[in-house]
Image (tube, rainbow, N blue to C red):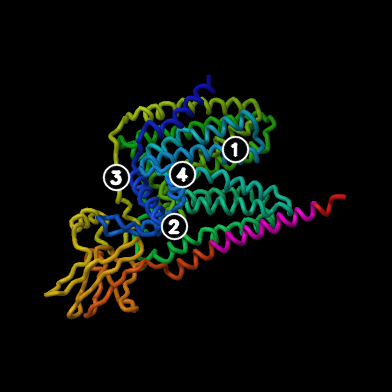
Amino acid sequence: MLEILLALVVLLELIAPFVSNTYGVDGGYHVSWIGEFTSLLARGVYLPRWIPEAYSGFGAPSFYFYPPLTYYIAYVFRAATGVTNSITLFQMTGLFATVASFFTVRTLLSALGSEGYQKNIAASLYAFAPLRIAELYSRSNLSVHVGYIFLPLVWYGIVVILQSQRVTRLRGILILAFSLALLAITNIPLLFVTLTSIGVAAILFYKRITRSVMEDVALAGLLVIALSAFHFFTVLSYMPYSNLTGLLVIRPAYLLTDLLHGASMAAAYHVFLVFIAIVIIGGAFTKLRRSKRGIDPQERTVMKLGLAVASLVVFLSLPVVSVPFWRFLPPLPLIQDSWRFYSYGLLFVVAMVAIASTPTMRKASRAVVWIWVLGALGPMLLVVFHFHLYPHFERPSDIATEYLTNHAVSRDSVVLTMKRHQNDVPALASLSGNERVELAAQSLTSETFEATLKSPRTVTFHRFYWPAWRLYSNGQELKTWPDSIGRATADLPAGNYEAIWKLERSPLEQAGLWVSVLTVAGIIAIMAAGRVRRRGMAKGAQP
């Protein structure tokens, strides 16, 4: 019966993208960004940065900062299927992440010694658990959902490093490096949750950390920086010109406080399912310890780490007492909310279900599977039949004002302010007689204006000021600045000429791109050389 219900949950999740357009509070801007990012790619901009249509055509630098991998995946589906509808691409990407995470977690579970039926049940639980439904259909933070693909691979890389002999060290280093780099260009808070959990593991199991392990992890860390440099060097280059401080949360929303005010009931449901599973498994483990029966070493290791992370999450969820830590302890302000750690509650429970070997632990694991399967069934029926227990909240597509240029008007009023100016001409100036400044040609990375001026004029352009947009006339760069509402402004000289705006890369952005490209090329070359050498050794060993 359990297997039938689990199969039903899996079936509902697999068909949901084809019968429902449901998405939650963060879904609006992901849907919008999918449309904008994939459109830019389809039009030949292979590293999208600037969104030209945002804020009533004044543009936005969102893709200079937001990790891009989720939207590249969406573009693959657009290119393969011809589908351009953003909601459909959102659903396709979400379905891909669900299925892909099933296979990546199987890789980790195999490394932990799980096999057969037990491994497949646990992997299904990871991919189709109630928490995953909440991430995709209630919160709809698509990048977090995609990030679940890489969480198991990060820990698989760590396991490989811990178990590797000298001849196989490179494999563990590369797995850890690539999985962390892919996670980094998918979702930043989830990356820092992962790094925090790795730090907890290092403290708990410091006796197992040898010099070679530290060397391998350090090398993997350097590779992560190099592989993701094309994105994060760009972030560093343009951070002073944005509102990124708005991403730092020093006073998170506490679920307990919300519940006291009668809010967040849906979130409480999913949090309850996570913690009841942890309590059941933790209780079974405690029972084993008190009975002085033999405890499997693998179970003990996973349990120790899981309960430590769960204890951290409980503490960070407590109002008042945890406030100083959210305010002053990096990287918590970037993690933003204790909800982010629930991904590791899920991974911990799944790992325990997969490796449970004693009758007590297997009984507890089966109880957890029953609870989560039944807990997933209700939400999936609501999704498939497009039924809402609460009013459906949608954010405007331009709501992610944290990525807005800091020269614009306040984040609260920017949407309405720029909408009032959406019909302004491309170049606004006080002209007389036959003077003119007219848009002659436009692309995604340049704009050409034909200017005929009898005297110098101050011209305001229909775009936010952004330092990557540079203005040239007769081969010389002109000084530009923002006006009172953030629009790009320049003093154009007298004469008859072309003024050309160009979207250019900063030196640090260009350096990051080269670092990433050369790192990938170097890794490929090393792997190819190693393969050739192994083939040569194999042939030499033949009689």
User: Picture quarter containing residue 418?
Assistant: bottom left
Q: In this view, does 224 lie to the left or right of 325?
A: right
Q: As drawn, which residue projects farthest toward the left?
A: 433
Dot placed on the residue nearer the N-terminal end, 2 or 3: 2
Boundaries of the magenta span: 517-538
Q: Mark 3 points at which residue?
A: 395
Q: Which of 438 and 135 is in front in this view?
A: 438
At 36% across and 63% down in the image, what residue appears? Answer: 445
SS under mark 4: helix
Residue 330 lies, with reference to residue 488, above or below; the image says above
Residue 237 at x, y = what percent? 42, 66
Circle 4 packing at 10 Å, graded few (<14), some (14-19), many (20+), is few
Q: Mark 4 against mark 1, which lies toward the viewer?
A: 4
* Residue 234 within the segment the image draws in magenta: no
Q: Is residue 363 left or right of residue 260?
A: right
Residue type of the residue flagged with mark 2 = Tyr
Q: Mark 4 points at which residue?
A: 80
Circle 1 packing at 10 Å, graded few (<14), some (14-19), many (20+), is many
Residue 250 visible? The answer is no
Residue 533 at x, y = what percent? 74, 57
SS under mark 3: loop
Residue 426 at x, y = what percent? 22, 64
Q: Name the residue under label 1.
A: 106
Residue type of the residue flagged with mark 4 = Ala
